Image: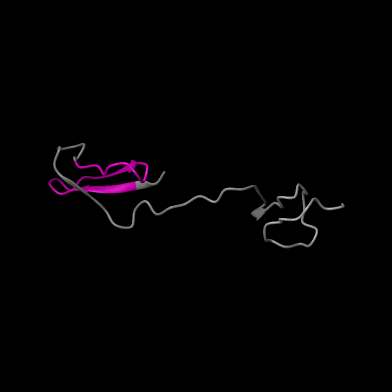
Amino acid sequence: MPTYDYECESCGHRFERFQRMTDEPVTECPECKGPVRRLLGSGGGFFVKGSASQGRFLPTCGCETRCCGSNEPCDGPPCEN
C-alpha cells in the first residue's frame, strides 16, 4: 500500500496516510477539519520482492551461487554443483 501526502487548504497542515490505491482520498484535515488536497508525486513507491544476499539476487533454482555468474534471475533447473 502506498503512502499519500496531503495538505490542508485552510491551515497548511501537511500529513501522510498509508492507504490502498482503491481507498477514497482523505477530505478533512485532522487538525482543523478544513478541506485537504492530495499532493502530486506521492504514493509512487514500490517494493521489489525476492531473496537477496550481499546486494545480489539469489538464483531461483535453489543454488546458493550462480553457475554462470549472471546477476539475472535463474529460470533453469537446479545446478549440478
Q: Residue at x 21, y 36 (%)?
A: 30
Front position in the image: 22 or 26: 22
Front position in the image: 73 or 16: 73
Q: Quadrant of the N terminus?
A: top left
Residue 29 appears at what percent x and percent y?
19, 40
Q: Residue at x 27, y 54 (%)?
A: 39
Q: How is the model colour-coded?
A: one colour
> Is residue 80 found left or right of 58 in the rendered image?
right
Magenta range is 4-27
Residue 74 appears at what percent x and percent y?
71, 56
Number of numbered discs visible in the structure rendering: 0
Q: Residue furthest right?
A: 81
Q: Residue at x 67, y 52 (%)?
A: 54
Q: Is residue 15 magenta?
A: yes
Residue 22 appears at what percent x and percent y?
34, 44
Q: Residue at x 87, y 52 (%)?
A: 80
> Is residue 56 found left or right of 18 in the rendered image?
right
> Is residue 52 found left or right of 33 in the rendered image?
right
Q: Is residue 54 magenta?
A: no
Residue 63 appears at what percent x and percent y?
78, 49
Q: Is residue 64 above or below residue 41?
A: above
